[in-house]
Amino acid sequence: MTSSENSTPAASEESERAPTDTSSTASPALSGIRPLRWWPAVILLALMAAMKIIPSMMEQPAPMPIMMIGFMGPAAVSLVMLAWWCFASRAPAREKGIGIAGFLVIAGLGTVLLHFTLKGMWVPLFIVPAATAGFTLGTVLFARSEKYRVGAALALSAAVFSYWNVHKSEGVTGNFTTELLWRWEPTPEDTYLAMLESSDLSSTAGAIDEPVDAASAEWPSFRGADRNSVVENIALDPDWSANPPKEIWRRRIGPGWGSFSVAGNRMFTQEQRGDQEVIVCLDTRTGDTIWEYSYDSRFWESIAGAGPRATPTIAEEGLLSLGAEGILTCLDPETGSEIWKRDLRDDADRQPPTWGFSASPLVAESVAIVHAGGEDDRGLLAYNVEDGTIAWSIPAGDHSYSSPQLATFDGVTGALMLCNDGLQFVNIADGEIIWKYDWPFTNYRTLQPLVMGNTVIITTSLGEGTRRLNVEHADGGDWQITEEWTSNAMKSDYNDYVAHDGYLYGFDGSILACVNLQTGDREWKRGRYGNGQVLLLAESGQLILVSEKGELVLINATPEKLDEVARFQAIEGKTWNHLVLIKDRLYLRNSNEAACYQMPVRGASAADVAALNVPAR
């Protein structure tokens, strides 16, 4: 046996007893430290980011599948992230338990501390996915550090919740971007209420001897007498640089998404003031309050916020108004005194729909018709205007944000109502259904039907498109309602369109578009005005558009191209409300303020303009 052979066992035994320093050469696996399997988490983070970014880059509203991915996708991915951490991350069991327990504590405490405007759907769809992404990002950044990765993950998830905890929501924009305020920052409604407390703004207008004449009211109801946003016999001077619109008055106003109705020197609208809905009568010349009528009611939802949605209707029997929680009132338009009041929640045996009761009452043949969406025959209700008793009620789907309107087909006049079941045409006297067109749609319908002779244009929401119907009635025979075309070239959501010289002008998503009424084909699509509203000046072929940001835009209605000729900032804040033009006076509002402008008129008589002029203040 050699000496080397003799020394091997001893050397081996000695080596087993001696400590070995492998800190500089051993792999993490050999040292007992196992880095996380981080690459699945990176893929999930990238997938969540794509789900949030891609829909926001598309024109709004995005197609329903894309929109649902944007809403629901991040929540689903966040669940997969947590599953990765628990079952596929390679973290030690103790670390997994601490991470999950800590995340649940942060999520629970963070949710409790949220402002009420950010609870409900915001938590599972927006806040928790963002916090989960923060947790996952922390584990990825410190994947090789058992000492710091759970702490970093919990710190980032807590930071996400802290960000939301110091904010509150004012709703969303047309492309579903959240409008956030600091939690301690007063809302426009708070500012308005403080102003009301510090000064008496009630009944500040001078006396108006002129009685309200419903028959000659210039703008008696939502979108005008025919509910089509068409103004006759006026043309505007397009050179707003040389002859700009002149502000006549501007005032604060409470939240509300309705518009104005106007008769003489009185204009009517609805607003929210704290826990009360208020119907107000303003002086068209100054914007001062003539009278106000209030009742306890507050409707709020997380998309549009607080406030009534409908527009008062001027009738011979009184002023009819519907609040967002379903309070229907009939008031004396000259004094604001109550004639009668009803509650749709009782009459239709239902709670307000998702975005509130929104129907502007239709008054015809001494009945006031509103959509309630109750079960069985309590969908469309007609009230006797004299005393508020129910005249008739019929089925009409279970939800709609459209309003009933008068229409005439082949000499037969009735009430036209668009709801989630489709379109129906009913007899005003007794509610008998004259004809019905079925086009069921699960989601909401908001827009008014557009009637041109025996043609009707109707629309769904959320990018599903527009349809042209032809209505025929043979002598003594049945009514025939046929589809002429259905087009995705005009995908309006809650932005009503107008028709001029064979073309339809309105919003395809958030972009203005022109569509051929004969074919449904798009002629052009340009101009990112957000989710605004549009008026047609029929004589001049001009469009007045109010953008979502409160800009007034003058456009020539032509199928050749978008021909914008003038623009200026008219009011501040998100503006979804319909605008009103009477002679040279333009009235507009949103949930923050209302204003009146004297518009530069082309070819108007001096007497007409002089009769309306008052000094700006």
Image (spheres, rainbow, N blue to C red):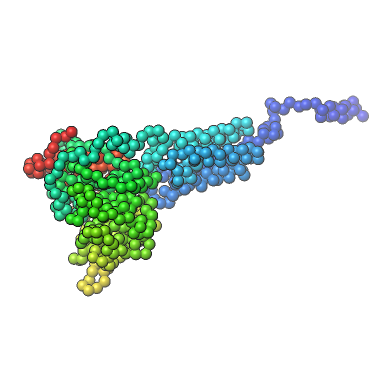
Q: Nearer the viewer, residue 291 or 382?
A: 291
Q: Please tell me how many numbered marks the rendered image carries.
A: 0
Q: Quick one: quadrant of the C terminus? A: top left
**Image location (x, y in percent) of residue 526:** 29, 44
Q: Nearer the viewer, residue 177 or 107?
A: 107
Left or right: 461, with 383 as reference point: right
Q: Residue at x 90, y 25 (%)?
A: 3
Give above or below for 583 relative to 6: below
Residue 455 can be seen in this image:
no
In front here: 171 or 340?
340
Residue pictured at 40% horizontal, 40% vertical: 169
> From the viewer's perspective, is 316 left or right of 93?
left
- When asked about the image quadrant of residue 139, the answer is top right
Question: Which of 567/279 is in front?
Answer: 279
Tell me residue 414's x, y (percent): 23, 63
Query: Residue at horizontal 48%, vertical 45%?
Result: 124
Q: Position of residue 451 (x, y in %)?
A: 23, 58
Seen in the image, is 133 located left or right of residue 453? right
Image quadrant occupied by the N terminus: top right
Q: Is residue 306 above or below residue 433?
A: above
Q: Which residue lies at the image location 31% right of the left edge and 35% below the top edge? A: 194
Q: Quadrant of residue 175?
A: top left
Is residue 122 visible to the viewer in this orientation of the structure? yes
The percent coordinates of residue 296 (x first, y second) are 33, 47
Please identify the quarter of the rendering in which residue 55 is found: top left
The residue most toward the right is 1
